């Protein structure tokens, strides 16, 4: 890496001067926000992006004008993906496997945050089902399409600091449900998935990492009122050291940067099996608050292996 990047870096910054012609990337959640910014930065550098979205009409509108020109119309295509239905996840992967075109990078960007208690069509708590189990099946079923040197970027959140996974009660059947506890569990799960996936595949030259994109105003917060957001920001700011600036909101291009840095720019061995934020590998921090750093439970190898086994049990499918 020729230059340092930080919280203010954009997707264009971390990919500057790189030629990604010939690279194929799958990005989930491309109908709004960070997903669209990620697609824009990748196609600008020449990559072919396969964008996955539940609502294809919305995705087409969101990415209109990106990646396709009369001279090079093949930089961007779309596939339908509903992470809340395992049958539809498998339908998506079956189509990609039948197509046979390989990938250099998968960015598991789609997600949901702090929704009221509900279940996916398969009966999973919605945030755990969408954020973790849907991507768990998607990525694992696409392993045959991963080229040597490929990477998986699992988009998580500082919200993982709110809660560890509960392998005995993933659906809140015996514990009290709160939207943020469920969000925290799901985002810890996305980190643990990257840890175990990396352990299983790094010897084959395929690695995985988890990234926190930072806080940005996107549709992810659709279930939160302005008052709730302001209360959260105030609570976080109270944990800052004296003299620190106000809460660091990012725009969507800045929020795409860590995924792109970890997926393309950084050395694979540096980020593999790790948690990254603001374009660097985060330090462990088991203190209070949501300011920065990664909880030790989220990178625990034994915890990651146990979650993998539980996830296979829940989805009814085993993976190497």
Image: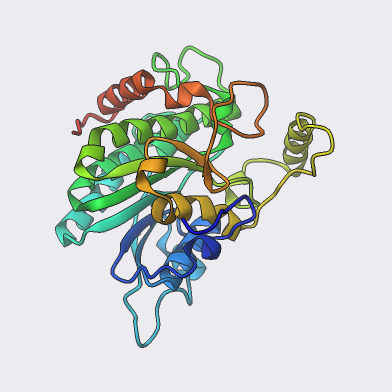
Q: Which residue is at a point 49% across and 26% down the rendered structure image?
A: 185
Q: Position of residue 75 (x, y in %)?
A: 35, 73
Quarter of the rendering containing residue 240: top right
Question: As displayed, is residue 142 above or below residue 32?
Answer: above
Residue ranking furthest to the front: 2
Residue 125 falls in image quadrant: top left
- Residue drawn at point x = 22 percent, y = 58 percent: 102
Relative to 132, is 16 above or below?
A: below
Residue positioned most to the bottom: 70
Residue furthest right as drawn: 243
The vertical placement of 171 against 63, above or below, is above
Seen at 41% across and 22% down, the residue is 300
- What number of labels is visible? 0
Q: Position of residue 319 (x, y in %)?
A: 20, 33
Q: State whether residue 84 appears in this view.
A: no
Picture residue at 57% right of the left edge, 27% below the top: 161
Percent coordinates x, y for residue 194 in the rendering: 37, 36
Q: Determine whether, in the image, residue 174 is placed left or right of residue 102.
A: right
């Amino acid at each position: 890496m020729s230059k340092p990047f930080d919280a203010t870096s954009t997707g264009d910054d971390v990919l500057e001067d790189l030629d990604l012609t010939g690279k194929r990337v799958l990005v989930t959640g491309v109908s709004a926000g960070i997903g669209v910014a990620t697609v824009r930065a990748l196609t600008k550098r020449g990559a072919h992006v396969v964008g996955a979205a539940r609502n294809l009409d919305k995705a087409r509108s969101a990415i209109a004008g990106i990646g396709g020109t009369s001279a090079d119309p093949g930089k961007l295509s779309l596939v339908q993906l509903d992470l809340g239905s395992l049958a539809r996840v498998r339908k998506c992967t079956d189509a990609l496997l039948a197509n046979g075109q390989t990938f250099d990078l998968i960015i598991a960007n789609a997600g949901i945050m702090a929704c009221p208690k509900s279940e996916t069509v398969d009966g999973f708590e919605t945030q755990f089902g969408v954020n973790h189990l849907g991507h768990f099946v998607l990525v694992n079923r696409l392993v045959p399409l991963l080229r040597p040197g490929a990477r998986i970027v699992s988009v998580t959140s500082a919200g993982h600091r709110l809660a560890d996974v509960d392998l005995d009660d993933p659906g809140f059947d015996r514990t009290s449900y709160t939207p943020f506890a469920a969000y925290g569990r799901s985002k810890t799960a996305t980190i643990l998935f990257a840890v175990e996936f990396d352990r299983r595949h790094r010897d084959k030259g395929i690695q995985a990492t988890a990234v926190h994109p930072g806080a940005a105003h996107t549709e992810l917060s659709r279930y939160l009122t302005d008052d709730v957001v302001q209360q959260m920001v105030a609570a976080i700011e109270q944990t800052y050291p004296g003299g620190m600036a106000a809460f660091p909101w990012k725009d969507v291009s800045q929020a795409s940067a860590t995924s792109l840095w970890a997926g393309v720019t950084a050395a694979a061995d540096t980020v593999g099996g790790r948690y990254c934020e603001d374009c660097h590998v985060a330090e462990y921090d088991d203190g209070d608050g949501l300011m920065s750093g990664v909880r030790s439970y989220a990178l625990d190898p034994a915890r990651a292996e146990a979650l993998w086994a539980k996830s296979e049990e829940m989805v009814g499918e085993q993976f190497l």
